[in-house]
Amino acid sequence: MTFSSKLYAPFVHSKRFNFLSLLIAFFILFLFYIIPYSPPGLTVNGRMMLGILIAAAILWITEPIPLAATGLLIIILQPLFGIMPAEEIYSAFGNQAVFFLIGAFIIAAAVETHGLHRRIALKFLKYFENTPRKFTFGIMLSTALLSFIMPNHGVAALFLPIITSILLAMKIIPKESNFGKVSILSIAYGCSIGSLGTLIGGARNPLTIGFLADAGITVTFLDWMIYAVPVVAVSLPIVWLILQFVFPIEINDVTKAKNEIEQQVAIDGKIKKEELIVLSVLIFTVFLWIFFSHYTYFGLAGIALLGSILLFFTGSITWKDVEKKVPWGIILLYGGAITLGLGMQQTGAGSWIAQNLFDVMSGNVYLVIFSLILFTILLTNVMSNTGAVAVLLPIGFAIANEIPGISPLFSSMIIALSGGLAFIFIIATPGNAITYSSGYFSTKDLFKAGTIANFACIAILFVIAIVYWKGIIGL
């Protein structure tokens, strides 16, 4: 949303629009506060939590104030309206997932500082430089895999100048060439799909394990990969095929692309000592995450912080680097999201929504699962995906508690993974906005390809959830 907001500055950040968004959000809060009536089954505090939920969703969608500021507002409003004690609200920042995020962001900052991500990207692209279709698949696969080890918007920002320099060398005309469209969209979609695979790819992933941890459900780094990687493995080639179908590639020769990649590899030269140190720490940290994060005395956060401290010990990163490169706003947004979930759970607002939804769907579990996927994808296409997941996780938890056959872990994974599949609009994710700034595709192109890709991914996630998660591993 941050990058997309810059693209839409004349509209989104006009004073009139900001004022109107804030006015609507606070008017809804006021209405929920003064109305003396609560629907059957909903307490007064539950009614106020629904008001906060709707107001937060409006502010996260329209973004008249920064996303993190909305997170802080949620924290302030709950004790203000007497929903939860202030001490309980602020203790949410002691959640292990908060410190996992901080540690993971510091490690990612070190990777970026020393250009290790660029070297990995170029080396990987060399294996896919023979034909146009292999090249575009190489872009999608490279961005997806790199999004396993660093935030996906950072991967998009890294790949865009590399790929645009190749397209310029090939004299590809922006918005006219299908090869150009597929190449740049492969960055955006590869990052989004890859961010599902591990806990590092997007803030919504540790947000989800934080919610689960508060409910006494432990999900390790390896557990997450077992659940999520099959979705990545199936979605990636199918979305790539959709891009080939929507935009048939018109060129056959990629010799200039091959030359440009080799030239950039030569410019980088041999791997430096600093890069080797960062790579070693990264491999060590990921190894611990995979094999030792299930131990309660160490955990995901402890490993992330250990990795980041090792980088400070070796001089691979400074605190100035951390201040500049770590997205602290995400931490504050996360805190607000956690308290939103606590409030929805403790007041029974989430259960009230879940029960009413289940009644509307006539008790059909499969319809509930499909609706969760569909609604999350629709919401994540028009607002921050972390915000969308934050809004829906408490409802998903409540659905799991009310409906036999759906566990909190199952509903949470559905929402978390659906929340990363934002393909339709520029404002949906920073990856879409960053790549759109290149000028190689139009909003119409994104909508056309993204709509088909989203429908395909809805089907993929639904089938994997029913057959693999429920049927095979008993999630």
Image: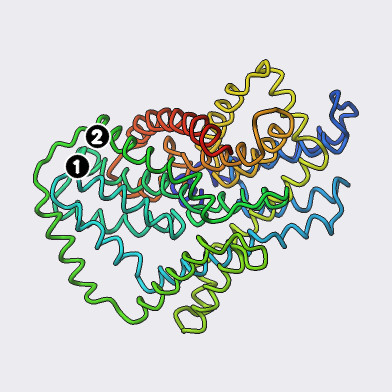
Element class at badge 1: helix
Is the Cβ of the residue at disc 2 closer than 8 Å to that at disc 1?
Answer: yes
Q: Residues within 10 Å of mark 2 (few under 14, many from 20)?
A: some
Element class at badge 2: helix
Report the residue marked by disc 2.
244
Using the rendered view, name the quadrant where residue 402 is placed: top right
Which residue is outermost to the top?
362
Compared with residue 359, is residue 412 higher up or lower down, i.e. above or below?
A: below
Residue 133's tag is: 1
Query: Is residue 99 rendered to the left or right of residue 381?
Result: right
Query: Is residue 145 rendered to the left or right of residue 353?
Result: left
Query: Is residue 33 rendered to the left or right of residue 375?
Result: right
Image spot of residue 316 (x, y percent) = 44, 80
Residue 276's tag is: none
Q: Quadrant of the C terminus?
A: top right
Compared with residue 103, is residue 26 higher up or lower down, i.e. above or below?
A: above
